[in-house]
Amino acid sequence: MNNELLTERLHAVGFTITAQQIEAILEDASKHNVPYSEFLDTLLKQEIELLENKDLERRINKAKLPYLKRIEDFDFAFQTSVSERRIKEIMTCRFIDNGDNILLLGPPGVGKTHLAIGIALEALNKGYTAHYTRCDDFITMCKKADERNTTSRLVNKLSKFNVLVLDEMGSFPFDELSANLLFQIISKRYEEGSIIITSNKSYIEWGKIFGDDVLATAVLDRLLHHSTTFNMKGESYRLKEKQKAGIQPIVAK
């Protein structure tokens, strides 16, 4: 068969990689007398790999992660308050199938967001869907949805992902609207979808975050029923990097 016609047909069925490499593939198969079944298997495997990579890229783009940081890059030797063994268990992603939540608590700079993103990225690699939002952005989304009368759509959207990452809980106070919409999302995801939350506030302070102790109790009741909490301590990574660069912190006198 004419290679040009073969290339055209490969493109027609979406076999892009094979179409681009068909001459080299045919030459190699002929040279090494590759059996038909092995030849077909090679073609299919590389096309499947291409599709999987495209799907992963789409999932990562939809996740809206602020940056890509893997768990492998996390410095457990510096952040000794986090058990590497427990994190490796989380990385199996069984928590998603069980509808469990992960809460990362601690002061700024100790690596909470890095862990949250690393876990979400591993979930994406395993074929799950995820979505990241910082709490101030969530509050803004709620206001815009309220103005457009689309709050139900927002709740449904943030309830459908396998993993929802809420970053920096406590850094930004919730108003009544955003607090109630968050409660709806958490209630809708209860035992169905996993939530990863980072917060610089202890649970006892969450009443101040929501401006409502009763609502905070209801939120925590659902979050903590099936959850793993990491209480992170220690020095700031950012301060460590500045010191490495020779920048000394300003000490108030």
Image: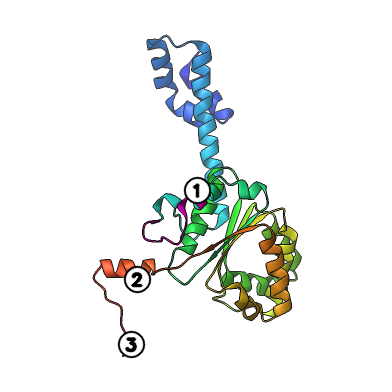
Rounded to the nearest angstrom, the CA distance separating label 2 from label 3 is 16 Å
**Structural distance between the alpha carbons of marks 1 and 3:** 40 Å
User: By what rule are the colours in the image chosen?
Assistant: rainbow
Q: Residue furthest bottom?
A: 253
Q: Report whether 136 appears left or right of 142.
A: left
Label 1: which residue? 88
Figure quadrant of the C terminus: bottom left
Residue at position x 30%, y 82% in the image: 250
Is 46 covered by the magenta stretch? no
The magenta segment is: 75-86
Q: Position of residue 66 (x, y in %)?
A: 49, 61
**Residue 26 in the image: above or below residue 170:** above
- Give me the residue at 70% from left, 80% from top: 212
The stretch drawn in magenta includes residue 76: yes
Q: Residues within 10 Å of mark 1 (few under 14, many from 20)?
A: few
Q: Which residue is mark 2?
A: 239
**Up-down relation of residue 95 to residue 52 (above or below):** below
Residue assigned mark 3? 252
What's the residue type where badge 1 is placed? Lys
Q: Residues within 10 Å of mark 2 (few under 14, many from 20)?
A: some
Which callout, 1 or 3, points at the residue further toward the start of the chain?
A: 1
**Mark 1 or 2 closer to N-term?**
1
Left or right, 191 with respect to 127, comes to right
Q: Residues within 10 Å of mark 3 (few under 14, many from 20)?
A: few
